Amino acid sequence: MTRLLSTITPYLLILTSVTSQEPDLTEDDSPVVVTSYGPVQGLKFVSPWTKKAIYSFRGIPYASPPLKDLRFKDPIPPEKWSTVKSCTQDGNACPQVDFFALPNSTLKTNEDCLYINVYTPQVKPVDGLLPVMVWVHGGGFFAGSGNYDETGPDFLVGEGVVVVTFNYRLGALGFLSLEIPGAPGNAGMKDQVLALQWVQREIQQFGGNKGNVTLFGESAGSAAVHLQYLSPLSTGLFHRVIGESGTALTSW
């Protein structure tokens, strides 16, 4: 198993520099997008690496918090909200032992962790909707997150791509399978399906083309991509895949 930042791919080699610092944030432009569940307010910043503007929406709930009676169970959509929800910071990462912590990492974990992040060069593209790339993080299905400092979307966004990242349940909370109603199994994989359904329903509001979605990931994330490619639950939710090191046959 490899760490996200050590995978030998052009995209992720770039990330080793991207993730070394947070972007130079400015609050002169705080776009609001209305989703099916309620309005969300993002933040515009200029990437310190590409010097191009990025509109980021971080920490959007794509599922109800998997707490109490929902623990171990299939995810369900979030409840709707009426007031503008601030989505300018990463949501909680899912509970884990962070063996791969970056220097000075301040990773915050909580079972309330099913959040999705959208990074777009234009909320309302003037030349048509933009291609979408959805990243599935690695980490052996027991660690990792979709947070900015682990994914560094700057360079893809700079090329006119809408980048989506998200968290999914890990470890026992995500993959305990007792074949009973209280723990049917593969909750983490089903979280991914719900996130992809969210993309199909909402991404156009962020300037993305729901008919041009690429699912990609590395290590365990790559294995998840392969499994989603094979699963009938994911039919129609993406159009191409990129797997970087892991496959459905890989064992962790």
Image: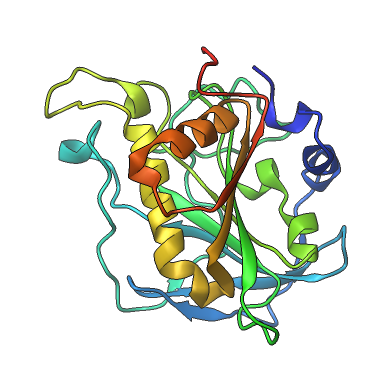
As drawn, the residue found furthest toward the bottom would be 126
Out of 243 and 88, give the one closest to the viewer: 243
Residue 32's spot in the image, x, y percent?
A: 51, 80
- Residue 1 as seen in the image, left or right of residue 48: left
Q: Residue at x 14, y 28 (%)?
A: 182
User: Where does the N terminus fall, quadrant-wise?
Assistant: top right
x, y (%) of residue 127? 70, 84
Image check: 128 left or right of 166? right
Q: Is residue 41 visible to us here?
A: no
Kindly identify the residue that appears in the image at 59 percent across and 75 percent down.
207
Quarter of the image for residue 45 reads: bottom right
**Quarter residue 149 falls in:** top right
Residue at the limit of the structure toward the left, as seen here: 181
| Residue at the spot 40% in from the left edge and 67% down from the top edge | 201
Q: Is residue 9 above or below residue 130?
A: above
Q: Residue 18 location in percent, x, y?
A: 81, 47
Q: How many marks on residues? A: 0
Quadrant in which residue 57 is drawn? bottom right
Residue at x 73%, y 62% (from the top left corner): 157
Q: Colour scheme used in the picture?
A: rainbow
**Relative to residue 27, is residue 184 drawn left or right?**
left
Taking the image as shown, residue 113 lies to the left or right of residue 149, namely: left
> Please, is residue 98 above or below residue 13 in the view?
above
The answer to which of 116 and 43 lies nearer the viewer is 116
Q: Is residue 146 visible?
A: yes
Q: Position of residue 235 (x, y in %)?
A: 39, 48
